[in-house]
Amino acid sequence: MCGVSLDSVEENRAFAEKFAFPFPLLCDTDAQMSVAFGAASGPDDQYASRYTFVIGADGVVEQAIDTKDPAGQAAALLESIG
């Protein structure tokens, strides 16, 4: 499990420390990953949409969930794969 953000290394480090982020937070500063996954429309986007992707062991995206409620996302995800 990891997170991806368009923010810089320094910004992501500060966010992770402030919120005690429990998993790695990757930097997608050129938005290549965000565009490829449909979370950003182009490299000039300042923010990516919040999505949760479930990727199988074979590398195939099994689910793409538009994460409108981050606080309730874990329960919704567990229910959908349970």
Image (tube, helix red, strand yellow):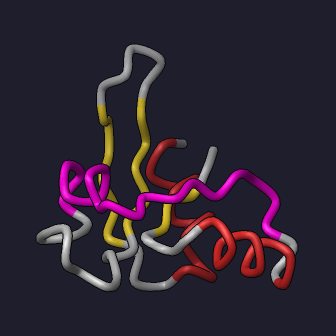
Q: Position of residue 55 (x, y in %)?
A: 41, 34
Q: Is residue 51 above or below residue 48?
A: above
Look at the image and give the residue range highlighted in magenta: 21-38
Is 29 in the magenta? yes
Name the side, left or right, on which 36 lies relative to 31. left
Q: Is residue 82 above or below residue 39?
A: above
Q: Position of residue 70 (x, y in %)?
A: 55, 80
- Residue 52, by quadrant, is bottom left
Name the side, left or right, on which 65 lies relative to 45. right
Residue lying at 48% horizontally and 67% vertically, measured from the top left: 5
Q: Position of residue 43 (x, y in %)?
A: 19, 68
Which residue is at the front of the view, 26 or 51? 26
Q: Is residue 37 above or below residue 16?
A: above
Which residue is at the front of the view, 52 or 80? 52
Which residue is at the front of the view, 30 or 48? 30
The count of marks equals 0
Is 39 in the magenta? no
Residue lying at 65% horizontally and 79% vertically, measured from the top left: 11
Q: Position of residue 8 (x, y in %)?
A: 55, 71
Residue lying at 31% horizontally and 85% vertically, measured from the top left: 46
Name the side, left or right, on which 29 lies relative to 43. right
